[in-house]
Amino acid sequence: ASQSSNDVFPSSIHIAATAAVTADLIPALDHLADSLGRKSAEFADVVKSGRTHLMDATPVTLGQEFGGYAAQIRYGVERLRASLPRLAELPLGGTAVGTGINTPPGFSAAVIAEVAEATGLPLTEARDHFEAQGARDGLVEVSGQLRTIAVSLTKISNDLRWMASGPRTGLAEIALPDLQPGSSIMPGKVNPVIPEAVL
């Protein structure tokens, strides 16, 4: 009584996603933004060519570019945090179809409070059980924020690859760490393995 797979399964998904976003993803993105911010300060006086359409444009600093990358990640975290209240809404107690049939008064609030306390997550009862059980809009919203972050990471990784291209016939504006040999027939060739792993 008081439970159905129709409210328990979506609640479990929302709990797991909220936990992953708050405990793993946001701290990792904050760390990345901080690291990019430090590089922005380090490269504040390194002047280089800006580019539009891959063609030389007006001068910029490498620090400005890295500051832009840090901002992309920070804005992604802001968007993700803004979507958390809807991700953390649980349909628990709506039972089979959202009516809460066979559920004693106060069940949803009490159980969700227990789960929130046990997990340390900001979980709340769904404002509308019919919406929460009939749709996955909260998850779709977070998925959209994750997509935006993924596009930002793709842009940053591609830029790093371009700037590190060379060393003789590419841009060679930055040097990425040598993490593994790039070629057995071309000594000294180093591939941008970390940016490519992100891609």
Image (tube, helix red, strand yellow):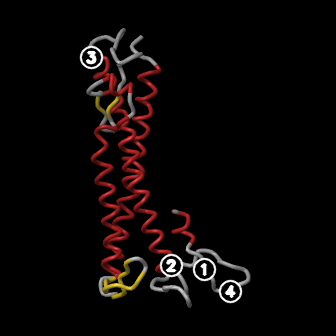
Residue at the image point whose x is 30% and y is 51% from the top: 79
Could you tell me which secondary element the residue under label 4 belongs to?
Answer: loop
Q: Residue furthest top?
A: 102
Quarter where residue 113 is shown: top left
The circle drawn on residue 187 is 4
Q: Amino acid at mark 3?
A: Gly
Residue at the image point whose x is 44% and y is 57% from the top: 150
Could you tell me which secondary element the residue under label 2 belongs to?
Answer: loop
**Could you say where residue 95 lies in the image, as x and y percent from the top left?**
39, 16
**Quick one: 42 or 155, which is closer to the camera?**
155
Q: Amino acid at mark 4?
A: Pro
Could you tell me which secondary element the residue under label 3 belongs to?
Answer: loop
The residue that mark 2 highlights is 176
Q: Is residue 21 left or right of residue 183?
A: left
**Quick one: 2 or 117, which is closer to the camera?**
2
Could you tell me which secondary element the residue under label 1 belongs to?
Answer: loop
The residue that mark 3 highlights is 106
Q: Label 2, label 4: how many angstroms apart (C-alpha)? A: 16 Å
The residue that mark 1 highlights is 190
Label 2: how many residues lie within 10 Å, few (<14), some (14-19) or many (20+)? some
Q: Earlier in the sequence, mark 3 or mark 4?
A: 3
Q: Are marks 1 and 2 in contact (CB under 8 Å)?
A: yes
